[in-house]
Image: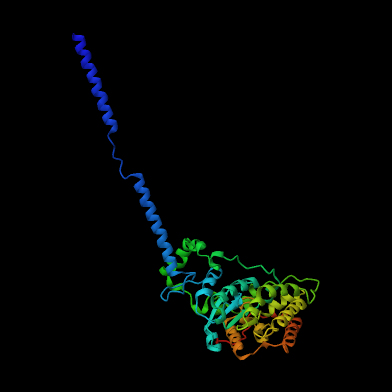
Amino acid sequence: MLQEKYKKQYAGSKKDSASSGTNQERTPQKVGIPYKSWLTGFLILSVTGFLAAAALVIYVDPFFQYHKPLPWFPYLVDNQVNQNPGLAKHMDYDAVLLGSSMTASFNTDWFEEALGVKTQKLSYNGSYPKDLANIMGLVFAAKGDQVRQVFIAADQATFSADTQETKFPITPYLYDENLLNDVQYLFNKDVLLNYILRPLADPKDKSDWSELYKPWWTDEYYNKTNVLMYYTPAEEQAQEKPADYYVEAVERNLAENICPYIESHPETEFVLFYPPYSILFWYDVVRERELEAVIGRLDYMTRRLLSYENVRIFNFLGKEEIVCNLNNYADFMHYHRDTCRYITDCFANGENELTPENYRESLEQVRKMAAEYDYEPIWENWQEETPRFYEGKG
């Protein structure tokens, strides 16, 4: 009897223990913030941050893809490939200035003063004809018949390049009208940091709208000593290139990249100019035995383009007061803003303009200058003090 009593007590004790253990296992434990709630909060914050960044980019729009510049914002305009498309689409203008760094020192206010046209500068340093075609496509798509004049610095050497060659690859989502690929602009760290937050924090670097892409050279860099210090003559060649050496390449570029716009927009006047490279440029041409080929290229370009009634051409290649005075230059090609002002004034008064009647005489004067110039004395006096051409007018 006693044994049975103990067995019952033992069995009951085990049952209670088992029951107690089961209840302990089923009791939920508090572990802080649930994982799903934390993840949801993180996602909401992330999405909100991205949307806020995109909204800020759209509002300020430092690449001008959606609207004109805000009047109060200190925009930094220093990226020609990425900012020119938006400038072409949304700025107010009825003329454009296109070309390489040969256009960088121009002040567009001069065009309004001398010619009465509100001009937008759209330079591409080292540009090729394809670069000109790319931006002209955007200009005419945005403004159409409102474009009264297109000013182009015609760097004739680039017209011998491949018709598809560009100085820098374009950024497709800034050149097209597809809004879907704009995410690369809206969520771009460089755009947000360097073109929105940085100008806000340090507005002293804001760009002057009339002098976009202005070179960093100050007046003291424009002198003969500086030019000669950094100039290395081209390697001399033995065989002279014939006069028609570049003609086929020039024709391809004109036919594909320039003439279609001239023909499609007879209401627009296209004003091209041959920039005044220094006499050292011609020294290189002579040493490389390319003088006849270069003059031949210029002859063909000029004749071909002057066949259009809406084209004007100005030639500054042989303007000896400019090209033979190295104090007009910061290097052997880039001229002072005073020269740019002179070129602008010529657009207004017709000085140095080529016509079907006079262009061959003008190009012959360039050929003669380059062929007969006495180059060696250039190095005899590095500190020549001849005043700059048109000094103080730029």
| Residue at point 34%, 48% (across, down) | 37
- Residue 151 lies left or right of residue 69; in this view the side is right
Residue 225: percent from left, percent from top: 62, 77
**Applied colour scheme:** rainbow
Quick check: 263 above or below 235? below
* Viewport quadrant of the N terminus: top left
Can the viewer see residue 5? yes
Residue 239: percent from left, percent from top: 81, 72
Q: Quadrant of residue 341?
A: bottom right
| Residue at point 53%, 69% (across, down) | 79
Can the viewer see residue 106? no
- Residue 361 lies left or right of residue 110; in this view the side is right
Residue 380: percent from left, percent from top: 69, 80
Quick check: 381 above or below 3? below
Quick check: 305 above or below 167? below
Residue 292: percent from left, percent from top: 77, 78
